[in-house]
Amino acid sequence: MSSTPIFSTDSHVIEPPDLWAGRTEAAYRDRTPRLAPEAGGDWWHVEGERVLSVNGGTHAGVRFKDVQALKLEARWAEVIAGAYQPGAKLKDMDTDGIQGEVIYPTLGMHFFRIPDAGLGRDLMRVYNDWLADFCKTDPKRLKAVALISLDDIPTAVADLTRAAKAGLCGAMISVYPSAERSYDRPEYDAFWAAAAEMEMPLSLHIATNRTLPPAARTADDRWSTKVLNTPTAYCTAVNYLEMSLSDMLFSGVFERFPKLRFVSLEYEAGWAPYLIEMMDYTYTQRARRANWYRFKDGVLPGDLFRQCVAISFQEDPLAIKLRKEIGVDNLVWGSDYPHQESTFPRSREILDKVLAGVPQMEQEKIRGGNAARLYRF
């Protein structure tokens, strides 16, 4: 088994039930997330709607013993300590052979869909402050990514600045804002400029859509969506990521802000070579429309993609076979601890298998070198 240091660019916490109690602005005190017991388990409710069970923190490693034992509901009492206590998390990292983690929320990913932008932003603020304190237990090993709403750009820049000053290492934005506010719009430039200036990588994580088309919703509410609850949704969710990245790239965002970095999370990485090939083909082989952006000095979309986009994978052997097309320097790894599909406690074993036959220098980059450079471990 390799002794190369491993850094996970995609790990999670399970938010404690009392996280928002007494911490939100007065106007939102009666609208904070509430954990409620139900017949099958404890469920988070937001704005009166049933959103998410706490099962994401109760089954780490279970799939390796009995995948049939995985369940969709659980009680808070079943959540493992490493999901919400930094000391216990560090012990589990030691068990799994992980040197450092970049940490994301669980319930918090769904805050992007809260219609009231003010409420969503305040819940994100409280979470960001809590996570910054969480990581102070061992800032060399625990890195925090802020939640940032882009509904109002000046406010988003202020929130990003606050997060950077608090020691957070990057920011997660909605993977897909909406067709009406797509990321090719110039109104976002002030935020892109701030993120580039502060060297804060921007994360595009599965399940963080701001809005969803009506066809992607169930009849009962806006939370229990097809984006989360069907096999088709899991297999095709990368569509939202591809649209956002393409919007930014073809509108010149990556050329205007060459120091800007985006990170794709929980979409694996095998999709990237095809998207790169199609972008280059479209740019060079289709009739140019008058409004199509043209890059300087013969640069191709794929060149800028590899310059600005890092891709986190979990166990994607296809991506490793295609690593040259993606860019070895663009691949980073994540365990998804403590969620059901995480590689804990077999992360090193799984990485050894996925990376078998890859030259040692490339392995070192993919296991942790690229992540250490991106997040300054």
Image (cartoon, rainbow, N blue to C red):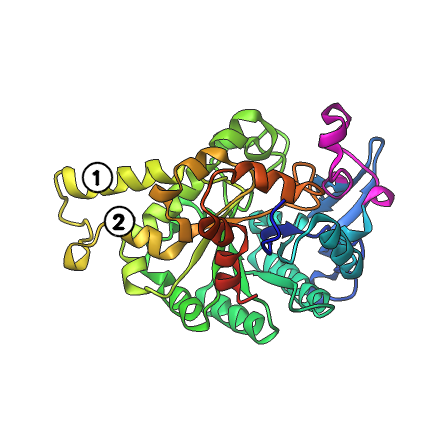
Visible residue check, residue 361: yes
The amino acid type found where label 2 is placed reads Pro
From which residue to which does the magenta span run? 55-79
Q: Secondary structure at mark 1?
A: helix
Q: Secondary structure at mark 2?
A: helix
Q: Earlier in the sequence, mark 2 or mark 1?
A: 1
Residue at image position (48%, 57%) is: 370
Label 2 – label 1 distance at C-alpha: 9 Å
> Label 2: which residue?
301
Percent position of residue 294, x then y: 17, 53
The amino acid type found where label 1 is placed reads Thr
Percent position of residue 258, x then y: 32, 64
> Label 1: which residue?
282
Residue neighbourhood size for the residue with mark 2, other residues' Cα within 10 Å, grouped as few (<14), some (14–19), many (≥20): many
Queried whether the magenta region covers residue 59, the answer comes back as yes
Taking 158 as reference, is 21 above or below it?
A: above
Residue neighbourhood size for the residue with mark 1, other residues' Cα within 10 Å, grouped as few (<14), some (14–19), many (≥20): few
Percent position of residue 127, x then y: 67, 61
Percent position of residue 346, x then y: 68, 40
Q: Nearer the viewer, residue 200 or 335?
A: 335
Cβ atoms under marks 2 and 1 closer than 8 Å: yes
Taking 83 as reference, is 144 above or below it?
A: below
Residue 128 left/right relative to 43: left
